Amino acid sequence: MPSQKKIELIQQYSQLLKDNPDFILTRYQGINVAKLSELRKELNKTNARYRVVKNNIFKRALSERTDIKDFPADNVFHGPIGVTFVKEDVTVVAKALKKFSGENENFKMISGVMESRYYDEAAMKSVADMPSRDQSLATLASALNSPARNIASLMNQVMSSLARAINAVAEKNK
């Protein structure tokens, strides 16, 4: 029979998973508390939360989520695990974690869940290399705006050429 503290932790993790359906798992062994505090501050800027979890209890809370497909819990949950709960843009959070892992060799992303799908370490590193949602929208807006800008420029050139031609004829007739 689980203790009251474990039951409360399961409920807490379940609520975090419900509020933040996307998350990234990390290994942090060998990272001191000061470094993890720096990481937490950086992740707070991206509206994400980093938590060190108890593996068996988190695994039990995760098993309550029936929407996640192909999550290899038995292969993932060994050793110290930290979970980054992502509320908004996963790519921004993955970039921050990748940057932190580059600065701290004992820290690494091991897997994650986005839109109810499991992604391994390589896939999460690829996500970190993708442009953020805002960057993608800006690129799309620019691509959609480009033809209109080109048409406006062309129309302006035609009008300028016509004005110069009329001006030249007027000058000639004087």
Image: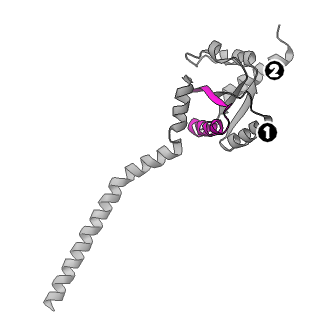
Label 1 – label 2 distance at C-alpha: 27 Å
Q: Quadrant of the N terminus?
A: top right
Q: Secondary structure at mark 1?
A: helix
Q: Quadrant of the C terminus?
A: bottom left
Q: Is residue 2 above or below residue 166?
A: above
Earlier sequence position, callout 1 versus callout 2: 2
Q: Amino acid at mark 1?
A: Ala
Magenta residues, as a range?
Answer: 87-113
Residue 8 % position (x, y): 81, 20
Image mark count: 2
Q: Is residue 165 highlighted in magenta?
A: no
Q: Amino acid at mark 2?
A: Glu
Judged left or right of residue 26, residue 133 is left
| Residue at the image position 68 percent from the left and 40 percent from the top | 43
Q: Is residue 88 highlighted in magenta?
A: yes
| Residue at the image position 55 percent from the left and 32 percent from the top | 125
Q: Is residue 161 above or below residue 46?
A: below
Q: Is residue 171 above or below residue 102?
A: below
Judged left or right of residue 15, residue 155 is left
Q: Which mark is residue 62?
A: none
User: Outermost residue, left direction?
Assistant: 173
Q: Residues within 10 Å of mark 1 (few under 14, many from 20)?
A: few
According to the image, label 1 marks what residue?
34
User: Outermost residue, top direction?
Assistant: 1
Q: Is residue 82 above or below residue 171?
A: above
Residue 41 % position (x, y): 73, 42
According to the image, label 2 marks what residue?
8
Say which quarter of the image contains residue 39. top right
Mark 1 and mark 2 residues within 8 Å of each other at the beta carbon: no
